[in-house]
Amino acid sequence: MPLYFSLMSSTRHPSPLRRLATGVCVLAGCLAQSSGVGAETLETALARAYSSNPQLNANRAGVRATDENVPAALAGYRPTVNVSADIGVSTFEGTLSRQFYKETTLPGGAGITINQTLFNGFQTDNNTRRAESTVFSQRETLRGTEMTVLYSAVQAYMSVLSDTATLELRRNNVEVLEEQLRQTRERFKIGEVTRTDVAQSEARLAGARADVGAAEAQLRSSIGLYRQFIGVEPRQLAPGRPLDRFVPVSLDASVDIGLKEHPAIISALHNVDSTEAQVKVLEGALMPNVSLQGSVQQRYDQSFANSNGYTAQIVGRLTVPIYEGGQTYAQIRQAKELAGQARIQVEQSRDQVRSGIVAAWGQLESAKARVIASQAQVQANEVALNGVREEAYVGQRTTLDVLNAQQELLNARVALITAQRDRVIYSYGVVQAVGRLTARYTELRVAAYSPKTHYDQVKDLWYGLRTADGR
């Protein structure tokens, strides 16, 4: 059941407006049902973010652009074909067999040339491997972006809910203090309290009104973040639910899963493959290159008017690099260092993932404990406030004691709201830390985006200007 906590400071002295009836429903660390038909739930908000978030869509476009590196690399296996044509004007004036001769011709022709690489030191093979590894790395980076966007959307959703509840608490506190100030002034008129009691009530009310202004500003800020990550203005948000069913059973299990599945680690491993393939590509530049060229040409008016000729040839070419000034050697050494750097970065990614999981797990455990403690604190402060008020009526407590008790109860309720918000957010945080906060794994009701679809559409294309979506 959702947790409810009363906004009333006392049943004996109720707020005159009482806008929220008996309480406000805030997200708790247990399952909560959607409040009302058509309410936005956390799951539907995440589905919106998954489908329309600009950052996520931009990264998807980036992965699609990276896919084109594979057919570009595969082009090394294929022939290149060129068609050429030319035409000009040539004038000859001179003597031929002791006779003056003048002739104007139109030399020209057309031809086709085909080049096919037969061997290039396995550069095409390794370029293709490098391109494929880069694609796989970018897919994992995209998965990491997806998790970041979804987690940011959870934070924005829960912040709007918690800030709304906090604002209502502070508004209700103003109403209570206004009623208390009115009663204090009445008692001052009949001599039951002093001017100091009135001043204390006025000061506390002024502070409460300032807190309302700050809460309103915080809510507006949260609404802005909600719009940024989810894409629409928040309307009638239902209570959020923790993602406990996807949280691993223990910290050790979380670390094991994260080290195997987290996209940052997998992306780093693909980067190692890519850099190692780049070393092979550069080493291939030092090996012989074998190619075959075939050409056919038709020429007109080459030597004299009305002449034409046809030429066809096939030429095999072997190129053996001897020395290129040391540039290629330097590039190979550089590539080896970059490959070593990539291997070190894998270990760095593992350390970062492990640290993130431990931190997220600790935050979730802390939030669970704070929810329980805050509930107890609210209940105790409610009892204390009622007791202080009763004692104040018989002269055993001052107005300041009552104001302090009310403030402690308000602080406890705000702390409970914060703890309940964190309870939900950090459950998603653990799932993100282990690398599983994705639409597919968490079963969001949305059409899943598959980067493989575009890859399969373009990897074997030999020609064409249109993208897979028709542009």
Image: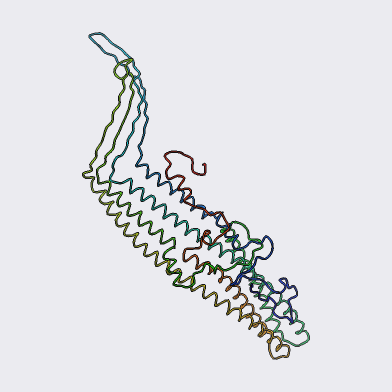
Extreme-left residue of the structure: 322
Write down the quadrant of residue 372 in the picture: bottom right
- The image shows residue 374 at horizontal and vertical percentages of 59, 78
Observer-nearest of 308 and 205: 308
Q: Judge from the rendering whether residue 281 lies leftward or rightward of residue 408; answer left or right.
A: left
Observer-nearest of 394 and 231: 231
Location of the N terminus by quadrant is: bottom right
Placement of 249 over or under 193, stated as above or below: above
Extreme-right residue of the structure: 190
Q: How many marks?
A: 0
Observer-nearest of 366 and 393: 366
- The image shows residue 289 at horizontal and vertical percentages of 26, 41
Q: Judge from the rendering whether residue 156 lies leftward or rightward of residue 461; answer left or right.
A: right
- The image shows residue 325 at horizontal and vertical percentages of 23, 46
Extreme-top residue of the structure: 99
Q: Judge from the rendering whether residue 283 lies leftward or rightward of residue 35; answer left or right.
A: left
- The image shows residue 297 at horizontal and vertical percentages of 33, 25
